Image (spheres, helix red, strand yellow):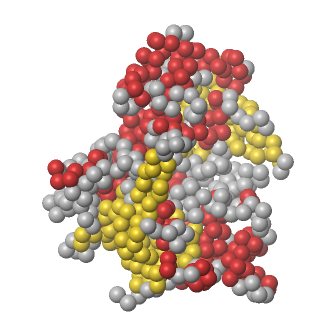
Amino acid sequence: MKPLLEVKDLDVGFETPDGRVHAVNHLNFSIKPGETMALVGESGSGKTQTAMAIMGLLAENGHYSGQAIFKGKDLLQMNTTELNQHRGNEIAMIFQDPMTSLNPYLRIEKQMIEVVMYHQGLNKTEAKAQAIEMLRAVRVPDPERNIRLYPHEFSGGMRQRVMVAMGLLCEPDLLIADEPTAALDVTVQSQITHLMSALRQESNTAIMLITHDLGVVAGLCDRVLVMYAGEAVECGSVEQIYYDPRHPYTQGLLKSVPRLDRPEDDSLEAIPGNPPNLLNLPKGCKFRDRCPQAFESCKEKPPMQLTEDRHAYRCFLGESE
Amino acid sequence: MNDRVLRVQDLAVYFKMREGGLLRPKTHTLRAVNGVSFDLNAGETLGIVGESGCGKSTLARALLALIKPDRGRVLWLGEDLNKLDEEALRKKRQDLQIVFQDPLAALNPRMTVRDIIAEPLWTFFPKIARVQVDERVRGVMKMVGLLPNQINRYPHEFSGGQCQRIGIARALVLNPKLVICDEPVSALDVSIQAQIVNLLKDLQKKLNLSLVFIAHDLSVVKHISDRVMVMYLGRTMELSSRDNLYKRPLHPYTNALIKAVPVPDPKLARAEIDIGLTGDMPSPLDPPAGCVFHSRCPYLIKRCQLEVPPLRRMENGDWVACHRAEELDLTIKASGKSG
């Protein structure tokens, strides 16, 4: 199957008074239609900036190079007018904090129908009907009445449902969700995760889920890309990543997730140290300073290794002879 | 027990909220904390868990006498903090410290690490010699895993996890007996969360601290608490020893909180769908009558809508506020060691 989105050799950097920050370095990945892929990494690993570059939303001081081929066209070469044909229509994005990404002055109705009217040329009544349908799909109770409310009148979980509904309104081919549950309580997080999992089965939308929490990914995603300091360090199916993690960073991430499904298990292993400074990235393997298994060769940059069943990881360990 | 340091009795904090027109405003009472009681021993860690709006941060502030309770008492080493005059309370605060949620927001960006950590020292011992201060600051920095040569740096030069270490160092510089940690790791990445939790656990053992560790989910609390208290809409739902709570929660809400924590295992995560919780949390301004949890409880019976269940002691010594605690079996089935 042809990939829906193919990111090739993506570089994202920012000019700052202290020098150039290297947020994303030579990133390659692809997402197939209908597939759910997770971009996992710590703050500063470049996962959000990858999404921002794809959506053309980088800050003013941002630079990028590389390609992001979406349905045969390179998003990174488009001007704003061309991008707007795709953004909100074929590619939609859900942001982390539903309070700051909804306009507090406008009713939900106005914010929702705007996008349908713009992209699909529907009139107000049709657009509203479609918006109400979508609210119903994300299990907002009494959508006919609630669509008249302002964002502050919703609870955090309901607001995030509205965000998901807005993202899905034009039935996009790709939905980018940037930490959609990080600002929510656990019980609400679990509701939203299950909602997204259900929606994924009902529609053919591909999802790119950005998160730092491997717990959320397990139930939702088909494939996982683990990022560290702006680089891909491991990529594979969800089973490969969870049951056979190859990169020491992925292994560390998995161990640091507290587990409540094993009442007896009392260990909580942290990854020592801190992520590297993006102004001044170390040469060689960027995880070297924090890696429990680092050795002499790690001063060189490790190559991306690919197993027969398409499990890729950037590490000298387990190198095929 | 003799080594009890903190005793909280029937603590309640209400906020008056005004709403409506200038001429005829309506007043509502928000019962942020409503009748909470617990004891804390020296060297013990109590985890307090609840979702937004359950009153856990208000409780933290009431424990430090930063807000006056509308009912009940906070006894620190037998003395009621709210009966002390200002100067006496100020002296007591040496023993009582707090670590805040957002590490960057809690540190003054214009102060160096030295000044931030030393500020409590200057406040309590204005005549202390500078050399002594530096020595003490470097000592605490080492204790929390910061490099003493970073003493002249500013908060923005540190990562989130390191900033939280600075916050902990500031809390420890006066050798307190009780540290209240208000969601100390919820703003941090998962891998860094584990570092900070393990650090607090080590420090607690080393210094025989009493800790109150507040969190919005049950996952981080598990590894550090001796006992865990679960709150919902200002009330205590359950107060159990750690091992009992995670193996066999007594309250349906505790059960839902445990099941809501995502499992990092694809096969298990896909199987588990029902966390046993319906609807949204009601407004704290208008909590349900009877049991405050009844509107979301899957085990609801008629009695729950009429009668407030009192917090009562079970045979094993744990406390629960549920009419049906004896008949419900909410045992958490351990998943195998897959993967």
Quarter of the image where one finds residue B308: bottom left
What number of labels is visible? 0
Nearer to the camera, A48 or B35: B35
Instruction: Name the side, left or right, on which A15 lies relative to B228.
Output: right
Q: Residue at (77%, 35%) from the top-left corner?
A: A60
Q: Residue at (46%, 68%) from the top-left corner?
A: B69
Nearer to the camera, A39 or B293: B293
Question: Residue B271 at what x, y percent from top left?
Answer: 30, 43
Question: Residue B23, relative to residue B122: is it above or below?
Answer: above
Q: Residue at (74%, 60%) from the top-left corner?
A: B109
- Pick out the residue farthest to the front: B23
Quarter of the image where one finds residue A249: bottom right
Judge whether residue A264 can be spotted in this image. no
Nearer to the camera, B23 or B42: B23
Instruction: Name the side, left or right, on which B115 lies relative to B13.
Output: right
Question: Residue A223 at what x, y percent from top left?
Answer: 47, 38
Question: Residue B39 at what x, y percent from top left?
Answer: 38, 77
Q: Residue at (51%, 12%) from the top-left corner?
A: A124
Question: Residue A50, relative to residue B275: is it above or below?
Answer: above
Instruction: Name the side, left or right, on which B298 lies relative to B209.
Output: left
Question: Residue A303 at what x, y percent from top left?
Answer: 64, 46
- Pick out the residue farthest to the bottom: B2
Judge whether residue A64 can be spotted in this image. yes
